[in-house]
Image (cartoon, rainbow, N blue to C red):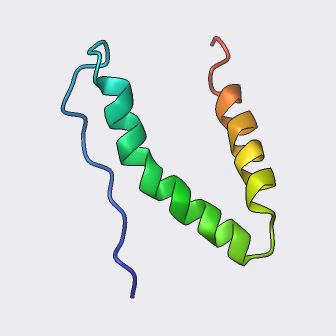
Amino acid sequence: MAKALTINAPQHKAMHAAYEKECRDVLSPHLEALLDKVEAAGWDRRQAASALMYLSAMHLKPA
């Protein structure tokens, strides 16, 4: 069975310069795993990545 991916707590405060890179580093293996699953199901990987960018951008809207 594949090792479950975990998400560690941040080591930096949100306003720290390294926070965003740390967040990207934590999320990257999850994104790759998700895109692998999507592609295995028959979806185009690039189209799926584009859809994820769109969905992510929707979370940037002001409350």
User: Percent x, y for residue 33?
Assistant: 52, 65
Estimate the x, y position of residue 55 in percent, counting from the top left: 71, 37
Q: Give the residue at x 58% y 62%.
A: 34
Up the image or down, 1 lies above or below 26; here it is below
- Total number of numbered discs in the rendering: 0
Camera-side residue: 2 or 21? 21
Q: In the picture shown, does residue 15 fall above or below 29? A: above
Q: Where is the C terminus found, in terms of image quarters?
A: top right
Q: Residue at x 70, y 67 (%)?
A: 38
| Identity of the residue furthest to the left in this view | 11
At horizontal 36% and vertical 64% (from top left) the residue drawn is 5
Question: Which quarter of the picture shows residue 24?
Answer: top left
Residue sitting farthest toward the bottom = 1
Across and down, in percent, residue 39 comes to 71, 70
The N terminus is located in which quarter? bottom left
Q: Residue furthest front?
A: 46
Q: Position of residue 35 (x, y in %)?
A: 63, 61
- The reply, left or right, for residue 47 in relation to residue 17 is right
Q: Quadrant of residue 18?
A: top left
Considering only vertical position in the picture, is 46 above or below 39?
A: above
Residue at position x 21%, y 25% in the image: 12
Q: Is residue 19 above or below residue 61?
A: below
Query: Does residue 61 appear left or right of residue 47 in this picture?
Result: left
Tell whether 52 sits left or right of 12.
Answer: right
